[in-house]
Image (cartoon, grey):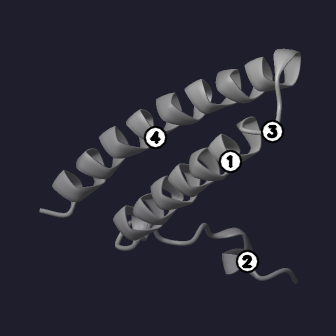
């Protein structure tokens, strides 16, 4: 007979979400900084692609920072 508890979901552990999100923000900032170095040696379409990607990265950082605030407030 199958174990009834084998499909039970893990409890929601949000205790380290803020830390994980902060790490993700730092990684994304580092990626932006590295791309600025790369852009020094590129031009044209490749440079435009990097700029567009950095814009998306900055939007992602804003969203992650909002989520950090939400997660931090949820810990109270």
Q: Residue at x 81, y 39 (%)?
A: 41
Q: Which residue is mark 3?
A: 41
Whole-number angstrom distance, CA of label 4 to CA of label 2 = 37 Å
Q: Quick one: quadrant of the C terminus?
A: bottom left
Q: Position of residue 30 (x, y in %)?
A: 57, 57
Q: Position of residue 43 (x, y in %)?
A: 82, 23
- How many residues crowd around disc 3 within 10 Å: few (fewer than 14), some, or many (20 or more)? few
Say the numbered circle drawn on residue 6.
2
Q: Residue at x 44, y 58 (%)?
A: 21
Q: Which residue is mark 1?
A: 37
Q: Which residue is mark 4?
A: 61
Contact between marks 1 and 3 (CB within 8 A): the answer is yes
Q: Residue at x 46, y 40 (%)?
A: 61
Whole-number angstrom distance, CA of label 2 to CA of label 1 = 50 Å
Contact between marks 2 and 1 (CB within 8 A): the answer is no
Q: Secondary structure at mark 3?
A: loop
**Compared to 15, does 32 lie above or below?**
above
Q: Of the residues under marks 3 and 4, which one precedes in the sequence?
A: 3
Q: Say which of 48 and 12 sits in front.
A: 48
Whole-number angstrom distance, CA of label 2 to CA of label 3 = 54 Å
**Compared to 18, does 15 lie above or below?**
below
Q: Quick one: quadrant of the N terminus?
A: bottom right
**Compared to 59, does 48 lie above or below?**
above
Q: Is residue 19 left or right of residue 10?
A: left
Q: Position of residue 49 (x, y in %)?
A: 78, 22
Q: Position of residue 40 (x, y in %)?
A: 72, 38
Whole-number angstrom distance, CA of label 1 to CA of label 3 = 8 Å
Whole-number angstrom distance, CA of label 1 to CA of label 4 = 20 Å
Q: Of the residues under marks 1 and 4, which one precedes in the sequence?
A: 1
Q: Of the residues under marks 2 and 1, which one precedes in the sequence?
A: 2
């Amino acid at each position: 007979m199958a174990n009834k508890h084998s499909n039970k979901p893990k409890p929601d552990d949000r205790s380290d979400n803020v830390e994980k999100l902060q790490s993700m923000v730092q990684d994304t900032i580092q990626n932006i900084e590295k791309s600025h170095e790369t852009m020094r040696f590129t031009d044209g379409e490749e440079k435009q692609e990097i700029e567009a990607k950095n814009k998306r990265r900055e939007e992602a950082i804003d969203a992650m920072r909002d989520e950090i605030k939400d997660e931090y407030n949820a810990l109270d």
